[in-house]
């Protein structure tokens, strides 16, 4: 990370299908901090993460990234792993990652072949690299989706139920990856129902509108 | 530059690998053109007069077959989220995906057309103009198809609706495409004016269609 950044949300509000999911949501997240987003099903966790990723418009409030090189580059500073893995079944594991490196990395220094290899190693996919991604199991696909975080480094990680269908050792690898990311000055927002061994700076409880 | 090239090459590769998209399109084109003379009878003069029109109409239908693939697969597996968060603006993403559709659909169809022209007794001196007109007109076909593909995103069996939305927009391409070929074979006017109109249509869709497609994509992601 070039310089410490922070993500500041002020009075965010969002409506979906005429129903107010959340309003008056404010939080600040500094470099090296992680925020756990929790709440019952349908509370708007996915919506909040997609909204920060720039995939959804928000109706009220302000969302700003401070300390970034360019203004208004919020979606390009985020890496989002959602419910869908975004994997091409017809391409091999390595091709999937190489595309993510080329497309998301944008020819930046550090993005390239070696980052693909290190991403494969981070989640233990090295031996599967040549297989078509369509042959992978659900957990392995999840690992492939998560290794995109490593292949194209971005300062803000938005993880929506990242540990779904992962085995115990993969969850450990995920926790290690998040820990490393935070140590390097990155930010993370994680929505998860299963406990993750990550030092969270706070918990954002949706559905009740309070910040714990 | 590198993200754009990566996206273009990936889409072309996937078109080759995923379910024989190119083969189906070319096969459909072949079958439609081949059964037309069976329906019309063996009148060579009639066939040669309507050859250009049949080849163009069949080309439009064939290219619509693969049109819903432009965005549908990426939408379904979640890749579209990644594409929207990349360094490229969304209209450029839509333009690159339309370009990949043109390379994998428009170009092969245009190159197959002269061979199918033999089945319809297409005058041999019309062949260069036919290929030229198709190469000039098919970018417009692919880019406009991308608008339909993005508007029908997320619907089941979107193919028919897509055709209903997009086929009327193909009328100018069809008219000037056929006019180019018939001017080249029967005269007396020069084939250049309709050909240049085709080029103009393609250039206009190259600029405008991705903007419309990107706006529809944003709505579909909500």
Image (tube, helix red, strand yellow):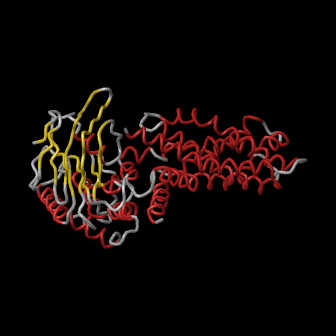
- Asked whether B110 or B146 is in front, the reply is B146
- Residue A6 percent location from the top left of the image: 23, 56
Q: Nearer the viewer, residue B175 or B209?
A: B209
Q: Residue at x 34, y 59 (%)?
A: A132
* Number of on-image labels: 0
Quarter of the image for the C terminus of chain B: give it: top left
Between residues B204 and B198, which one lies in front from this camera angle?
Answer: B204
Give the residue at the far right of this rendering.
B188
Q: Does residue B167 appear to the left or right of A122 in the view shown?
A: right
The residue sitting at 35% across, 45% down in the picture is A55
Q: Position of residue A35 (x, y in %)?
A: 16, 50
Question: As displayed, is residue A116 above or below residue A35?
Answer: below
Asked if residue A76 lies left or right of residue A31, the reply is: right
Task: State the residue in front, A72 or B141.
Answer: A72
Residue B182, percent from left and from top: 82, 46
Q: Is residue A94 left or right of residue B216?
A: left
| Residue in view at x 11 percent, y 48 percent | A202
Above or below B148: residue A187: below
Q: Position of residue A134 (x, y in %)?
A: 33, 53
């Amino acid at each position: 990370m070039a310089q410490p950044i922070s993500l500041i949300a002020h009075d965010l509000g969002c409506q979906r299908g005429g129903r107010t999911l959340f309003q008056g949501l404010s939080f600040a997240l500094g470099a090296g901090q992680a925020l756990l987003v929790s709440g019952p099903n349908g509370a708007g966790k996915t919506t909040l993460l997609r909204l920060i990723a720039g995939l959804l418009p928000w109706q009220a409030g302000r969302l700003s990234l401070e300390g970034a090189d360019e203004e208004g580059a919020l979606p390009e500073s985020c890496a989002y792993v959602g419910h869908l893995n975004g994997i091409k079944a017809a391409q091999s594991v390595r091709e999937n990652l190489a595309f993510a490196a080329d497309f998301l990395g944008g020819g930046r220094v550090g993005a390239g072949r070696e980052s693909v290899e290190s991403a494969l190693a981070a989640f233990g996919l090295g031996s599967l690299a040549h297989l078509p991604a369509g042959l992978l199991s659900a957990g392995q696909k999840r690992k492939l989706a998560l290794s995109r975080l490593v292949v194209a480094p971005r300062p803000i990680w938005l993880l929506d139920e990242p540990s779904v269908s992962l085995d115990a050792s993969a969850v450990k690898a995920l926790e290690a990856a998040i820990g490393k990311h935070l140590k390097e000055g990155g930010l993370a927002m994680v929505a998860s129902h299963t406990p993750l061994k990550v030092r969270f700076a706070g918990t954002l409880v949706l559905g009740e509108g309070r910040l714990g | 530059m590198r993200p754009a090239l990566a996206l273009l090459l990936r889409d072309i590769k996937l078109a080759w690998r995923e379910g024989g998209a190119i083969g189906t399109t070319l096969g459909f084109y072949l079958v439609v053109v081949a059964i037309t003379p069976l329906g019309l009878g063996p009148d060579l003069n009639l066939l040669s007069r309507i050859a250009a029109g049949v080849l163009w109409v069949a080309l439009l239908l064939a290219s619509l077959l693969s049109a819903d693939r432009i965005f549908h697969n990426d939408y379904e597996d979640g890749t579209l989220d990644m594409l929207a968060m990349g360094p490229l603006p969304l209209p450029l993403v839509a333009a690159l995906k339309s370009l990949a559709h043109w390379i994998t659909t428009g170009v092969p169809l245009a190159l197959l057309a002269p061979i199918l022209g033999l089945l319809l007794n297409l005058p041999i001196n019309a062949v260069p103009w036919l290929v030229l007109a198709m190469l000039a007109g098919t970018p417009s076909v692919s880019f406009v198809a991308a608008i339909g593909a993005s508007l029908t995103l997320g619907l089941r069996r979107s193919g028919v609706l897509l055709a209903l939305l997009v086929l009327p927009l193909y009328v100018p391409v069809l008219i000037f495409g056929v006019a180019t070929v018939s001017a080249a074979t029967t005269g007396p006017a020069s084939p250049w004016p309709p050909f240049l109109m085709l080029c103009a249509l393609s250039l206009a869709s190259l600029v405008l269609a991705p903007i419309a497609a990107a706006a529809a994509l944003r709505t579909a992601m909500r």
